[in-house]
Each structure stands twice: as C-alpha cells, then as structure tokens.
Amino acid sequence: MKATEARLIAALDRPPADIRLYLLHGPDEAVAQAFVARLAKAMGVEAERIDLDGAALRGDPARLADEAAALSLFGGARFVRVTGAGEESLEAVTALLHAERAGNPAVLLAPTAKATGKLVKAAIDSDRALAFACYPPGARDAAAIVADLARAAGLRMSPVAVQRIIRGSDGDRAVMMREVEKLALYLDAAPERPVDADDTALEAIGAEIAEGEIGEVVLAITAGQVDQLIDGLRRMSGPDASPIPLLRALGRRLVSLSEMRAAIEAGEGPEQVMKRHRVFWREEAATAAALRRWTLPMLAGAQQAARRAEREVIAAGPAGRVVADHFLVRLARSAR
C-alpha cells in the first residue's frame, strides 16, 4: 500500500500484525533513518535487530523471508533492517510478501529505487506492505509536513511557529519530526488532549538554529577559517542540535561555488559571476576568496565527502554531532 506520512508513523509507532514490510524509498536518507528509529523504539529497547543489505539479498533472496519468520535467540521482539536496497531486492521482497508466515517486520531503505520501479510497485500492490517516498520537502510541502506532524502529536501550531521550525531545521524532515516530538513532550500534548504551541514553548526547547549562524559557519568552512568555524560550532552545540541542516547548507554552498568557478574558468570575470549568482554583498569578499582557493576538482571532492559525511552522521546516531564536527574541521583545514 502507498502510505501517507501519518499512516506510516501510526504503523511504525504501533506495528500492526498484518504489515510485514515497510519500504522507504527516495534520496532523503535522514528521514528514512528517523522512521527506522521510530520502529526500533516501538519494538522495545531489548528488541533484536537483524541488519542486511541489498547485496546480501541479491545473493540469497530467501533470507529476508527466513529472517522475518525466525524466532529471536532470547525469545523477545525482533525486526529486520535492510540498507542499500534496490531493484536487486525485488525477488526477496516478493518472497517475503508471499510467505506463509512472517512474525517479524522488515524495513527496507531504498534510496535509489525509482517510484515507477518494480520494487516500489510490488510494495504498493500488496496489503502486507507500506511504501513511502522520502524526498526533501519544498517550502509548501515542509509547512504541510510540520502541520500534519503537529496535529498527530496533539499540537495546535500557529503559521509563525510552523515556519520557525522549518527555518531551524533547514527543511530537514527528520529534524522537523524530532522538534515536534520534543515540543509535544514539553507541553504534555497528545491527540486526545491538544495543546496550543507558541513562541515561548519553542524558545524553551531551543527549537531553532539561526539561519545566520549556519551561514557564518559555512562561510568559515569554505574560507578555511578554522578558529571561526570552531567558535560557530560551539554556539550551535545544544544538546539536541542536529548537524544535518548545516551539512546540507554546506552542500548547497559547494554546488554554488562549483557553478561560479566553472563560469570563471570559462572566461567570465569573478565580479560578473557573483553578480549573476546574486551573492549577498556581505558575503562577496568571502566568496571571492573561496573562488580563488577552491578548484573544480576540489569542490567535486568536497561535495562527495559532504554527502558521505551525512550518511555517517545518520548512522552514528547520538554520536553524529561528533562525526560532523570532525569532518567540518578537517574540511576547513584542507581548504586553508
């Protein structure tokens, strides 16, 4: 079945016996991992997690159904997580959905699977599966997502509060989910007892990282200013601050620098390039310095490293902040 976000969250928080498979496809791996965390929480801290990947299922298609039907070594709850899944997992998924029994839920993370592919179609066509597309939301989508998450958590949020969470998360769905959950917990809200959420409550949980701080840190990284970077990271080091918005802002900055650097190498003047790209006047000096400092191969390598770092941060869980800080300092030093 094709799931709405509300339907998926409800199923992850209270896994129904008739759902064998949760297929999370699309490039937003951060939100997919956040959904996996919800399932793990619902299964309990003692639950046994079996980790597989797409390559393992390609070599042994029957294993997914076998693991879903197997009993835990300690007699407790059990679930299967498959990472890096793609079309090569179709045979394994088909076997799971058609197996006689499967007592343990399986969640597949398929970031490269196409919405029109056979893997997604198999999940949508089955009443034993839920399929959800994980894509970074646009501005309108982000507002709708926060509003839906708030309603499901028992929060009545004003449009201003919704936009504040979007800004503080840089549009990252996983971060938005966590901020809404924190706010609901702080206000003791629930669907059966809705509560109004205002700026005072948002201030209390520290639900916003200022856009200006993210921008300053990104500029420090690309300028090779290690001391300024460390100061900025310290200011943003709240106990629940997520590094994902910062990494994504860095990725956008690197893409923009790549486009400008390519134009300069094609013969266009730096001032003309920055004007065409509408560089903010306060950032002109830093941008000009970065364009002199970075070559196209360096920028391409940095973009790949930033994407890899985001995946490592997600996989590291609570230690993700340390992983991100280490990567950012190394990148700034290499730029210097």
Image (cartoon, helix red, strand yellow):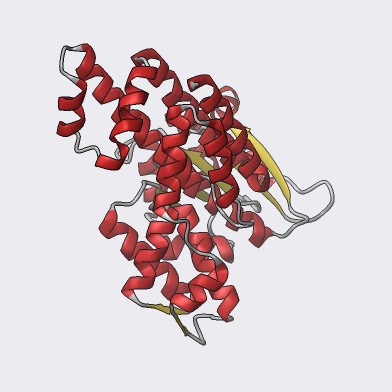
Name the residue: 26% across, 59% down.
140
Tell me where residue 236 appears, x and y as whole percent. Answer: 55, 51
Q: Quadrant of residue 272?
A: top left
**Horizontal arrangement in the rendering, residue 124 relative to residue 43 (left or right):** left
**Horizontal arrangement in the rendering, residue 130 relative to residue 18 (left or right):** left
Placement of the N terminus among the 4 image quadrants: bottom left
How many numbered discs? Answer: 0
Quick check: can you spot residue 288? yes
Tell me where residue 62 appears, x and y as whole percent. Answer: 60, 33
Vertical order, 269 against 183 (above or below): above
Q: Closer to the camera, 151 or 217? A: 217
Q: Quadrant of residue 148?
A: bottom left
Q: Closer to the camera, 3 or 175? A: 175
Q: Closer to the camera, 290 or 153? A: 290
Q: Quadrant of residue 146?
A: bottom left
Tell me where residue 55 appears, x and y as whole percent. Answer: 56, 24
**Horizontal arrangement in the rendering, residue 49 relative to residue 95 (left or right):** right
Name the residue: 47% across, 85% down.
194
Name the residue: 78% across, 48% down.
72
**Horizontal arrangement in the rendering, residue 78 relative to residue 192 (left or right):** right
Tell me where residue 6 appears, x and y as whole percent. Answer: 43, 65
Vertical order, 155 against 285 (above or below): below
Residue lying farthest to the right in this orientation: 74
Name the residue: 61% across, 56% down.
238
Quick check: can you spot residue 129? no
Vertical order, 189 against 319 (above or below): below
